[in-house]
Each structure stands twice: as C-alpha cells, then as structure tokens.
Image (cartoon, rainbow, N blue to C red):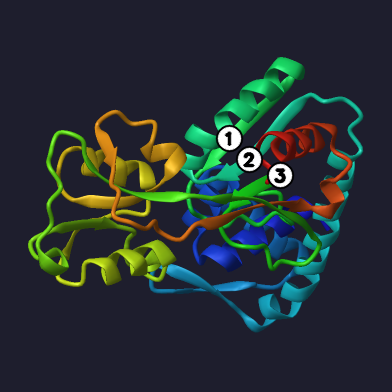
Amino acid sequence: MDWNDMRVFLAIVRTGSLGAAAKQLGVSHPTVGRRLNALEQASGQVFFRRVGQGLVLTDSGDKILRLAQEMEHTALAIERHIAGDSDQPEGLLRISSADWFASYVLAPVLNELLQRHPLIVPEVIAGHRLFDLARRDADIAFRIVPFTEPDIVQRRLMTMSYGLYSAAHLPFAPAQGGEGLGLITMNTAQAHYPDVLWLQELFPRARAVFTSSSRTVQAQMCGMGLGIAVLPRPLGDKLAHLQLLDIGGQPPGRDIWMGYHHDMRQMDRLRALADLAGDMLGS
C-alpha cells in the first residue's frame, strides 16, 4: 500500500475535510480527492461518508485507522533516522519558538551558528503552537513549558527575567490599587500565566485594556501609552519607547526549555545549534 495514500487518509481523519487535509499536506484539493479515490478503489471499500461540510470515518475506515497510524509511526521513524544520520552541518533546520524569543534572545545564537556553519539554513517557525517533534513539525523547539511527550531530549536552558514596563513618554503615578490604570496582558488562553496573575494582584482595581498572545504586540501597545505590561527583559529593555518601572519587586521569571526528538540527536546541524545555545544562553 502506498504510504502517500495513507498520509492523505490520516490527514482527512485529523482535519475532517478534503480541503483542510490538502492545506495541511501542502497539496491541491484535487490531489487529495484523487488519492482518496485511488485508495478506496484499490481496497474496494469506502472509508469516509459526508456529514454536512465534512467527512467522518465509516466502519471500514475505522478498522484501518490503527494500521495507518502504525505505518505513519514507522515512516516518521525512518525519516528521523535518515535525517539524524547526516554527517554534514548543512541543510534546513526547523526551529520553533515564540516570536520575541527568536528576535531578541535566539537571534545572536543563530547569527553565530551561521558564522560557523554557513551551509545551515535556519527556518524559524515563530508562535505559541506546541509543535509535534515526533512528526518533525519542527526539529528543535524552545518554549516556556517542559516537554511531556515521549522520546524527547530536553534541557532547562535558562531562567528568563521579566519586568514591568510603561510608555517612556508618560509619567507613572498609579492611584491606590491601580484605579484607572490599563493593563496589557496575555490573552484568555494564557490568563493563568504567573506574570498575568502577579500583575492583577499588584493592581486589583486596574482593568485589562488589551490582550495578545504576542509579547511583541504587547510591547508596541505599551509604548503607545495604552497601559502597562509585563514583558521579558531582553525584549522590554531593548525598546527605547518603553521604561522599566521600579516598584520594589519584579514579576516571576519563567524557565526556558530546549527540546528535540532523541532520533535527531545525531543530526549535526541540530547538535550544533543545541550546543551553541547551551554555551551562549545556558545558566
């Protein structure tokens, strides 16, 4: 059975439609439809039935799902093994991290990496999505939460300091409890972050005026005078339109974790970045 057909089958299962599967796989909608038709014709069975605008598994499709997942597991292991066997520090290296971390912390590391190994091509995938390293959505990831997935080699790289900032052109003289003060915080999905809770406890009478999952966007809105924001020090300290506020305490820091799949540990370009990040950023 063709592995490419199985990839299409699994993409449809996970996304629920031909169009979404095509987008996930980076192919055209007709290509997905043709591969599904070929798979069903070869097996003599129908694997999906249409429900509204989407597709759901039939009993026949459900029966082969586990086998398709096992095939995927084996194929991905082969891909990781082949990539991990590379003996030259060259080629594409996919790196997952938050945008601010890539811009203000990781950039000097990547610059040094390219000075030493100019044939490596870093591809930074910026955002908060937790990529699946086993599926090679990224080769190496930097994030603020430990990795819980199996077979991940991880290291606590550093502890990131945070500070409280306001616009540099405005005075900071908050009323009792922060009455009338605007807070710029993480969005609802990250409302449990320690710095958000710290800020709300510090100014219980203040109100949230802007939220974003991007620290970079928060910094820009803070610099415009919309409100105060807790930001990573490497970001906030670099922006001239912000001022670090001295309130007799500081927000809680966060650990930064670096991780990659153990099958990739022999990839020279990955190991070069991991070693360099440890040397330049490690605490």
Q: Amino acid at mark 3?
A: Asp
Image x and y of residue 54, in percent: 45, 69
- Relative horizontal placement of residue 40, taking residue 159 as reference (left or right): right
Of callouts 2 and 1, the N-terminal one: 2
Name the residue located 84 percent from the left edge and 38 percent from the top edge. 267
Compute the Cα span from label 1 to label 3.
15 Å
**Callout 2 touching callout 1 (CB < 8 Å):** yes
**Neighbour class for label 2 at 10 Å: few (<14), some, many (≥20)?**
many
Image x and y of residue 63, in percent: 74, 80
Which residue sits furthest bottom? 59
Quarter of the image for residue 184 reads bottom left
Q: Name the residue carrying label 2.
A: 95
Q: Amino acid at mark 1?
A: Leu
Image x and y of residue 237, in percent: 38, 35
Element at badge 3?
A: loop
Quarter of the image for residue 205 reads bottom left
| Res 267 seen here | yes
Element at badge 2?
A: strand
Residue 139's disc is 3
Of callouts 2 and 3, the N-terminal one: 2
Near-viewer residue (42 or 109): 109
Quarter of the image for residue 216 reads top left
Compute the Cα span from label 2 to label 3.
6 Å
Q: Amino acid at mark 2?
A: Ile
Q: Name the residue carrying label 1.
A: 106
**Callout 2 touching callout 3 (CB < 8 Å):** yes
Q: Quadrant of the N terminus?
A: bottom right
